[in-house]
Image: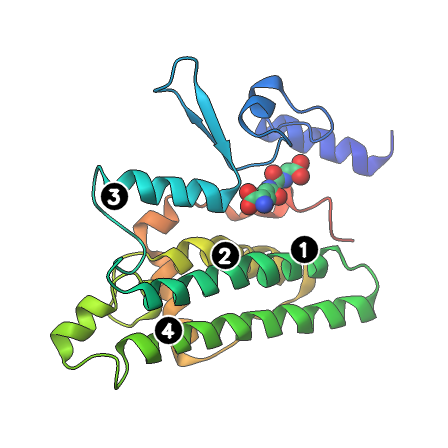
C-alpha cells in the first residue's frame, strides 16, 4: 500500500472517520449521496431526514418561526433586505465554495496562483454584497434614525459593527472563511484580505461563542484536507 494511503488509513482510525468509498447505511439513509450535513428527524416514526445545507437551514428557519420565533434573516416585513442576504448566500454557494476547492486542488504552481486570485476575487465579491446590504438597508435613505437602523440591521449579521447576533450570511460564509484561514494559509500560503471592516467582521465571527461551538480543532481541519494538497 502506498505511504499516502497508509497515512490516510491512520487518520481515518484516529478520527473514527467515515470511509468516503464505503459510506455506512445510516449516513446514506439521511443523505443519499453520503454527503454532510444531513439532518435526522427522530420525532417522526420511523425517523425522516433532510440533506443539502441550504435546505436544512431553510427548514430550521421555518421551524423556528413557529417555535422559538428566532430568526437569522431580516424580518419578513423587509423582503428586499432578505433578498440581499440571500444574494450573499448564493454567492457563497456558487462562487466562494467552488473557488475554495479549485484553489485547494490546484497542483501546478501557475494553477495555484490563478485559483488563488479567483478565491481572492470571490471574497471581494462577497464583501461588495455585504457592503451593499449595509448601505441599502441601514445606510442613508434606508433608515431614518438610530433606533430604526438598529431594527433594520437585524439579520444582516456580524458584518454590521456592534451587532452581536449571527446572521444568515455569517452561517453560510463563516465555515469557509475559517477553513481559508486555517487550511489555505497552511497548504497554500494564502493570506486573507486586510481591511478594517473585513478584519472586524472576521474577529466578531471567529470569536462568537455560537460559531466557535461549531469549529473543530485546527489539526482536524488540516488532517481532513490533507488528501487534497501536494
Ligand atoms: N451541496 C451540498 C454539498 C455537501 C458536501 O459536499 N459535503 C462535503 C463536506 S463539506 C462532504 O460530505 N464530503 C464528503 C465526501 O465527498 O465524501 C450541501 O451544501 O450540503
Q: Residue 46 is drawn in which quadrant?
A: top left
Mark 4 and mark 3: Cα distance apart in space: 23 Å
Mark 2 and mark 4: Cα distance apart in space: 22 Å
Q: Of marks 1 and 3, which one's residue comes earlier in the chain? A: 3
Q: Are marks 1 and 3 in contact (CB under 8 Å)?
A: no
| The one of 147 and 218 positioned closer to us in this rendering | 147
Q: Does mark 1's beta carbon lie closer than 8 Å to ligand 1? A: no
Residue placed at 12% from the left, 73% from the top?
147
According to the picture, the residue beneath numbered tag 1 turns out to be 101
According to the picture, the residue beneath numbered tag 4 turns out to be 133
Mark 1 and mark 3: Cα distance apart in space: 34 Å
Q: Dot 4, how many residues are within 10 Å of its Cα: few (below 14), some (14-19), or many (20+)?
A: many
According to the picture, the residue beneath numbered tag 2 turns out to be 178
Residue 101 in sight from this viewpoint: yes
Q: Of marks 2 and 3, which one's residue comes earlier in the chain? A: 3
Which disc is residue 65 wearing?
3
Residue 48 placement (x, y as % from top left): 45, 22
Residue 106 vs residue 39: left or right? right
Residue 130 placement (x, y as % from top left): 41, 72
Q: Residue 205 is drawn in which quadrant?
A: bottom left
Residue 175 placement (x, y as % from top left): 49, 53
What secondary structure is found at the residue carrying circle 1? Answer: helix
Amino acid at each position: 500500500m502506498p505511504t499516502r494511503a497508509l497515512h490516510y488509513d491512520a487518520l481515518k482510525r484516529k478520527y473514527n472517520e467515515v470511509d468516503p468509498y464505503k459510506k455506512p447505511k445510516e449516513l446514506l439513509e439521511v443523505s443519499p449521496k453520503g454527503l454532510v450535513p444531513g439532518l435526522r428527524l427522530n420525532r417522526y416514526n420511523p425517523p425522516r431526514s433532510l440533506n443539502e445545507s441550504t435546505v436544512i437551514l431553510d427548514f430550521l428557519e421555518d421551524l423556528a418561526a413557529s417555535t422559538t420565533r428566532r430568526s437569522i434573516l431580516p424580518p419578513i416585513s423587509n423582503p428586499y433586505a432578505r433578498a440581499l442576504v440571500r444574494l450573499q448566500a448564493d454567492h457563497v454557494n456558487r462562487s466562494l465554495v467552488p473557488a475554495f476547492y479549485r484553489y485547494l486542488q490546484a497542483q501546478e504552481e501557475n494553477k495555484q496562483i490563478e485559483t488563488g486570485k479567483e478565491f481572492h476575487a470571490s471574497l471581494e465579491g462577497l464583501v461588495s454584497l455585504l457592503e451593499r446590504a449595509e448601505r441599502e438597508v441601514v445606510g442613508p435613505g434606508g433608515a431614518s434614525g438610530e433606533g430604526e437602523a438598529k431594527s433594520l440591521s437585524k439579520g444582516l449579521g456580524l458584518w454590521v459593527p456592534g451587532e452581536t447576533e449571527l446572521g444568515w450570511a455569517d452561517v453560510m460564509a463563516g465555515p469557509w472563511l475559517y477553513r481559508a484561514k486555517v487550511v489555505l494559509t497552511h497548504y497554500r500560503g494564502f493570506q486573507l484580505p486586510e481591511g478594517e471592516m473585513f478584519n472586524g467582521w472576521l474577529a466578531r465571527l471567529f470569536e462568537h461563542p455560537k460559531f466557535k461551538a461549531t469549529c473543530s480543532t485546527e489539526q482536524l481541519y488540516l488532517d481532513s484536507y490533507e488528501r487534497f494538497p501536494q
